[in-house]
Amino acid sequence: MNIRISDASTRSVGRIGIERVSISLGDGADAFEAVRDLHFAIGPGELVCVLGPSGCGKSTLLGALAGHLPVTGGRLTVDGQTVLGPSPDRGIVFQQHTLFPWKRVRDNVAFGPKMRGVGKSERYHAADELLRLVGLEGFEHFYPSQLSGGMQQRVEIARVLINRPRVLLMDEPFGALDAQTRSMMQEVLLEIWTRIPTTTIFVTHDIEEALFLADRVVVMSARPGRVIEDIRLPFGRPRRAELVTEPDFVRLKRRILDLLKQPDSAKSLARLSPLGIR
Amino acid sequence: MTAARTAGQVPRSRWLVRGLSIVACIVLWQLASAQHLSLGFVTFRNVPPPTEVLQSAIVLLKSPKLLAHVGSSLWRVFAGYGAAVLLGIGFGFAIGRSRAASDLLLPPLELLRPIPAVAWIPLSILIFPSSEMSMIFITFIGALFPIILNTVHGVANIDRRLVASARSLGGTPTAILREIVLPGAAPSIVTGLAIGMGTSWFCLVTAEMISGQFGIGYYTWEAYTLQNYADIIVGMLVIGLLGMGSSWLLTTLGQYLMPWRQPAVAR
C-alpha cells in the first residue's frame, strides 16, 4: 500500500487527455449525441470541476472516462493509455451512493484490495486507515443503511481511494445532500484531496460548489455538450468557507451564471447518468 | 431504534386478548360439536370435539405410526423441494444473467407455469413407475416455479450501478456474480423459497391423499375412509405444524444469511 502512496505523490500520474471526443447515447431512432468534439487536457493532480446545464453530457463524459460508456469519436487517455473499460485506476463516485448493502463499511472499503487478492488482515488494515482519513473511525462494523447520506459518501470516497487511482471521477457526489452537509463534505473532500493528491474531475451544476473546490472550471453548453469556457481560478489553498463572499468569487460566479444563461443552454433536459440515459 | 423497540414489544394486555381469542375459538368448537350444531348448509354432526381430538393426538404421539408418517412426508419434501431449490436457483441465475439461456429455457417454462402442480398428479403417476417418485416429483414441480421466477426477478433487478461500481473497483465477472449478484438477489430468492415451501407441502399432501402408502396426507385421508374422524383433525394439525416449522426454518435461515436486512441493528 505504502509504495503506491509515494508513487502518486512523487511521480506525476493522472494526466487526462480528452481528444476530440464525441459520445452518442440511445439506440436507433432515439439515438442522440450527448457530447460533441470535446477537447481538453487535465494535468496531474488537478482538481477540475465541470459545470453545465442538466443533460449537457457532463456525466456522460465521466461515464466514458470510467470506461462504462464507449466513445463514438475521438479518444480518451489517462497517462497516455487509451481508456477501454472500467479499471480501479479510474475510481468513480456516483450521486447516489453505490455501497454494497450486504457488506459492512470495512468490507465495502476493502473491496478493491480483495479483488486484487490482498489478504484479509492487510486489506482491513488499509481500509481502517482510509476510514480514519475520511473521519469514520468507529463505524467499521456498520452497514451502509445505518449511515447518514454524508457518511455514505465518505465511505464511497474511501472505497475508491483505497485503490490509489490515477484519477478520481465524481458525478455530483454531494448533489443529494442537504446544504449544510454538502458544504461540510466539500471541505472534507478538499482535505482528503490534499492528503492523497489525485487528479479529480468533479461534475456539478452548483456554481458555488465548483468555484469553491476547483483549480479550474470547465463550463459546458447544452446538448450536445461542448466546452464554452475554461477558467483557471485565482484562489489559493487551503480554501475557507469565507471565500464564497469575496469579490473575486462573486464576480466569477456572475460570469458563469451569464454563460449558463445563454439561449442555447436555456432548454433544460433530463439528467443523464454515467451509465447512459438513465 | 426506539420506534423499532416499541413496535416489537406488544403490551401484555394485547397478548391477553390474543390468547383469549384462541381459547374462545376452541370453546365454540367444543360447544358446536357437543350440541351437534346444524345450520342446514353446514353441520357439526360428524365433527369431533377438541377433547376427542386431543385424546387421538396423544394416542398418535405414543404410537410408532407418527414417526413413520411424518418421516416419509419429510423425506419427500426434502427430496422434491431440495431438487427444486438446486434446479430453480441454477436456472434462475442462468435465465437472469444470460440472454441465450433465457431464450432457451424460458419459453417451455412459461408454457408449463400456468398448470397447477396438482394437475400433474395423474401424468406423474403414469411417468414414474414408483409412487414414491411420482409424489416427490409433484412436490418438486410445486416448488420449482416460484423459486425460478423469484430468482430470475432478483438476479435481473440488481442495481446496475452496483455492478458498475464493482467493475470500477476491479471486480471480475466471477467475483461480481459471487459478491454482488448473489447477495443482491438473496432477498428475492428467499421469498421464492418461502412461497415454494408452501406450495411444496400443499402438493405433497394432495399427492399423498391420492397415491400414498405412508405420509401425513395419506394418514389424514385414511382416517376419513376409516371414519376415525378425530384423526382427520389430528392429521390437519400435524400438517399445519410441519408447514409452520419449515417456514420458521426459512425465516431463520434468511435472517442468518442476510443480517443487513434486519431493521436498525444496534448502533
Image (cartoon, coloured by chain):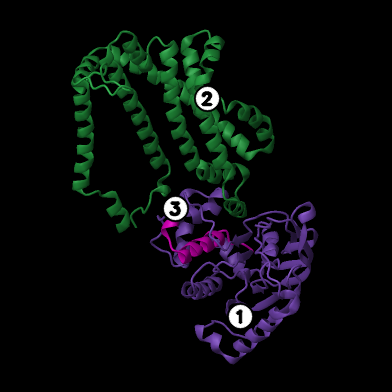
Chain colours: A purple, B green
Between marks 1 and 3, how big is the CA–CA gap? 35 Å
Identify the subunit bearing mark 1: A
Mark 1 and 3 residues: CB-CB less than 8 Å, in contact? no
| B164 is higher (above) or lower (below) than B80 | below
Reading the image, the residue beneath label 2 is B116
Q: Is residue A202 left or right of residue B142?
A: right
Q: Position of residue A26 (x, y in %)?
A: 74, 55
| Dot 1 or dot 3, earlier in sequence | 3
Q: Is residue B14 magenta?
A: no
Q: Which residues are magenta?
A: A145-166
Between marks 2 and 3, how big is the CA–CA gap? 42 Å
Q: Position of residue B186 (x, y in %)?
A: 49, 41
Reading the image, the residue beneath label 3 is A104
- What residue type is disc 1 on? Leu
Q: Which mark is residue A211?
A: 1
| B218 is higher (above) or lower (below) than A142 | above
Q: Residue furthest front?
A: B40
Q: Position of residue A204 (x, y in %)?
A: 62, 71
Name the front one of labels 1 and 3: 1
Identify the subunit bearing mark 2: B
